[in-house]
Image (cartoon, helix red, strand yellow):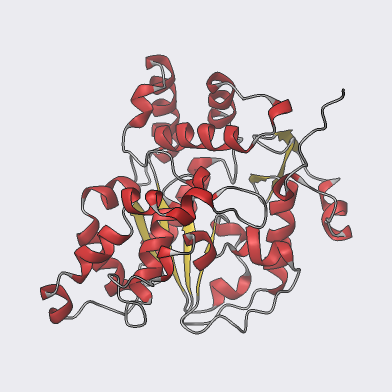
Amino acid sequence: MQISKAPVPKYLKDDELTQECKDLLSSLPTEMGWVASTFYKYQGFWHPCRHLQGILSCQKHFEAQDKDTLLVTTPKSGTTWLKALLFTLINRTHFHHSAHNHPLQSNSPHVLVPFLEVKLFLEHENPDLSSFKSPRLFSTHMPYVSLPKSIHDSKCKLVYLCRDPKDTLVSLWFFTNKLRLQEMGSRSLEEAFELFCGGVSMYGPFWDHVLGYWEESLKNPDKVFFLKYEDMKDEPVVHLRKLAEFLGCPFSSEEEKDEVLEGIVELCSFDNLSNLKVNKVGKLPSGEDYSVFFRKGEVGDWKNHLTSEMVERLDRICKEKFEGSGLSF
């Protein structure tokens, strides 16, 4: 008896591409993908074709508003955590962090803070965003150079989060292997390491992505808030307070006294979010299980996976790439 293959999840399908995207793909450099079979290089960065279509639609149609907040991350750098924190921070007057019916209790952070190019502008070329009440909160992995012109021209705020490249690599390796179909097999760490060092990863090269936002945060600190995952993990209350001030919604002395910051940090903690039922059994419309977005969330887990030779090589590459920028990991 022949065993039927599992249906291909939506995030791996490329049968709904626009003609514009198909025409562009034929002209772009290609490399081996991490989940989908192929990466395409657009504006200096690598993308699977579905994400590229979302980027093109977003660039063409997204109209930023001055009160918008855009959460920007390199993939696997704490995106889920920061989405939860920012949603709770911005909406704290509507939903108290201790309420049993807080939206995070029954919704994934990826639903509450949707990706522009991986969700909204991928499902519809020009989606109706009128249901999003101001101040709107969106997320993206897009590099700075690829952001829609309306974002550059508006007064909207960008909160950028990145992570030690060694932990980013390890997390990306685990994450993408979970998304690969069984018949694809798993990608080895050695293979993933070589691709990452060559700059070929989702929205990579990693260092170019980070430097784009780092340099802009130095030029325009009122618009771009640059944050490292390790710093956020080390002092979450301190950085949550800074985020609130940056976004124009600082905590009052009464909120400080009532330990609202500590309550938000606890609600959005890895232990709490990963143990909620919705994040154990839920699934995105594109097919990814919510659970794949939670693994360890630890700083320094790379020590359990990378060889000393790998560490030395990746550190050397990053030192060269970031030299003179004032940025280091």
Q: Residue 224 vs residue 16: left or right?
A: left
Q: Residue at x 83, y 52 (%)?
A: 24
Q: Residue at x 51, y 41 (%)?
A: 206
Q: How many marks?
A: 0
Residue 84 percent location from the top left of the image:
40, 62
Q: Residue at x 31, y 38 (%)?
A: 299
In the rendered image of this protein, does residue 312 appear above or below residue 137?
A: above
Q: Residue furthest left?
A: 257
Residue 216 percent location from the top left of the image:
44, 61
Q: Residue furthest front?
A: 1
Q: Residue at x 30, y 45 (%)?
A: 230
Residue 21 percent location from the top left of the image:
82, 56
Is residue 271 visible in the rendered image? The answer is yes
In which quadrant will I find the C terminus?
Answer: top left
In the rendered image of this protein, does residue 85 appear above or below residue 181?
A: below
Q: Residue 311 vs residue 192: left or right?
A: left
Residue 15 percent location from the top left of the image:
85, 51
In the rendered image of this protein, does residue 39 appear above or below residue 3?
A: below
Decide which of 69, 219 is in the foreground and name it: 69
Is residue 199 visible in the rendered image? The answer is no
Residue 56, picture quadrant: bottom right
In which quadrant will I find the N terminus?
Answer: top right
Decide which of 236, 270 is in the foreground and name it: 270
